[in-house]
């Protein structure tokens, strides 16, 4: 995220919530919007322009079966659901970290954050 091409202006890594309940009914003019659930999709992060501040925004989040590690939030709409965001803050100028302690725990269990932040800091020295 944030390096080149389509993600050059999307420097933050954001883990979408897995889709929860359908928030709006779909019609010909509107893409379905899902509420966030209590769990994150830790396998398919997306690149975003800024970390979500609250639930008033949404992103297209992975819903298909493409074999890609990081997605841009407006790629391949047929492979994505529109999911309401949750409150985050940025960590190490690169990651959108959840404010909710229970959601934070999901990331902590998946990653060794002390090592990740340390490696990021070293990468900024050169």
Image: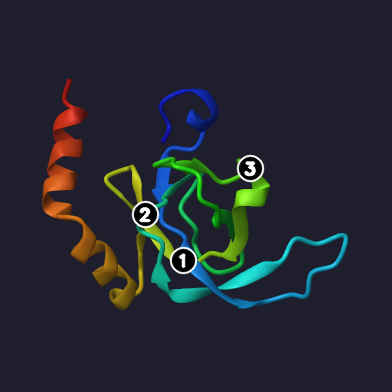
Residue 52: image location, x then y, percent: 49, 58
Pair 3/1: label in front: 3
Under circle 1, the secondary element is: strand
Q: In which quarter of the image is the C terminus?
A: top left
Q: Do the residues labelled 3 and 1 touch (CB within 8 Å)?
A: no
Residue 76 disc label: 3
Left or right: residue 119 versus residue 14 is left
- Mark before the other along the chain sequence, 3 or 1: 1
The residue tagged 1 is: 17
Left or right: residue 54 versus residue 32 is left
On screen, 74 above or below 26? Answer: above
On screen, 8 above or below 102? Answer: above
Residue 111 versus residue 87: which sits nearer the camera?
111
On screen, 24 above or below 47? Answer: below
The residue tagged 2 is: 43
Under circle 3, the secondary element is: loop
Q: Which image quadrant is residue 70 in?
A: top left
Name, please, the residue furthest toward the right. 28
How far is the residue under mark 3 from the one under mark 2? 17 Å
Residue at 12% from the left image edge and 52% from the top image edge: 114
């Amino acid at each position: 995220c944030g390096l080149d091409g389509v993600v050059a202006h999307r420097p933050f890594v954001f883990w979408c919530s897995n889709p929860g309940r359908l928030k709006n009914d779909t019609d010909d003019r509107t893409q379905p919007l899902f509420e966030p659930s209590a769990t994150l999709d830790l396998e398919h992060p997306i690149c975003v322009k800024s970390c979500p501040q609250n639930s008033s925004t949404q992103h297209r989040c992975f819903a298909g079966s493409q074999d890609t590690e990081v997605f841009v939030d407006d790629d391949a709409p047929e492979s994505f659901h529109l999911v309401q965001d949750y409150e985050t803050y940025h960590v190490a100028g690169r990651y959108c970290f959840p404010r909710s302690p229970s959601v934070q725990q999901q990331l902590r269990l998946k990653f060794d954050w002390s090592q990740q932040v340390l490696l990021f800091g070293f990468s900024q020295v050169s």
